[in-house]
Amino acid sequence: MRESRLWFWHILSAVVILVLLGLHMGTMHLSELLHMAGIGSGEPVDSSQVFRRSQQAVYMITYILLLGTGLFHGLYGLRSIFFELSLSRSLEKLIGGVIAIAGIALFLYGSYVAVIVFQINGV
Ligand code: HEM
Ligand code: HEM
């Protein structure tokens, strides 16, 4: 039951990543096209552009969402790969615990950065 619920979240997270990463890649790689259409500067990784985006609530929220779904999807997938190796139950538990702690730590750190940069004024 727990495994099928986690698997459901794995698939759902893939759908969220598909949308948000599509937008993220579009922002990072198609800005030259947008620039030609008169939108943006055409320099998406210029620090002024990075801060301009990061200080808008909608970006901060979607960064945290992409961070959370990306970490969950990637780490749950990694856990599934380990679990296919027919390891002992105790080793599976250990691997699951380490992956969960790593995921939570990375999520807290990444979210903290997104919130701090959002709060900085006038960079
Ligand atoms: C467009 C975005 C993505 C889509 C649509 C997608 C979709 C999927 C699907 C359908 C599965 C198979 C789930 C299953 O049947 O159990 C899967 C597995 C997996 N995904 Fe993704 N994924 C995406 C992005 C990513 C990213 C960015 C990562 C890395 C951070 C990742 C890492 C994995 C891993 C490690 C597995 C497990 C592979 C295995 O069990 O052999 N995926 N993904
Ligand atoms: C060449 C490809 C990529 C480039 C150039 C890029 C660039 C950037 C930049 C400049 C930022 C800072 C925020 C902003 O300026 O909007 C950012 C944030 C972020 N990117 Fe990417 N990125 C790339 C690929 C990816 C991929 C493949 C993923 C996930 C699978 C990803 C996930 C994220 C997340 C979650 C954040 C927010 C992190 C946080 O605030 O803690 N990026 N990216």
Image (cartoon, helix red, strand yellow):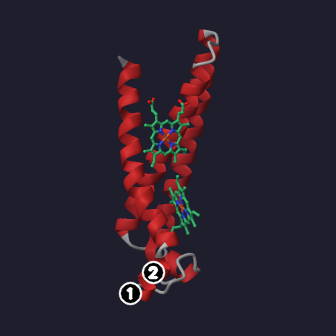
Badge number at residue 26: none
**Residue 121 seen in the figure:** no
Picture coordinates of residue 96, whole percent (x, y): 57, 25
Picture coordinates of residue 13, whole percent (x, y): 39, 42
Picture coordinates of residue 10, whole percent (x, y): 42, 35
Do residues under tags 1 and 2 come within 8 Å of each other at their CB atoms? yes
Query: In the depicted view, which residue is nearer to us: 91 or 115?
Result: 91
What is the CA distance from the residue labelled 1 to the residue labelled 2? Answer: 6 Å
**Residue 39 seen in the figure:** yes
Q: Residue at x 51, y 57 (%)?
A: 112
Q: Residue at x 57, y 46 (%)?
A: 106
- Of all residues, the one furthest to the top in this rendering is 88
Q: Amino acid at mark 1?
A: Ala
In the structure shown, which secondary structural element does the residue marked by tag 2 occupy? helix
Picture coordinates of residue 108, whole percent (x, y): 52, 48
Q: Is residue 63 above or below residue 71?
A: below
Apparent side of residue 120 relative to residue 62 in the rendered image (left or right): right
The residue under label 2 is 33
The residue under label 1 is 37
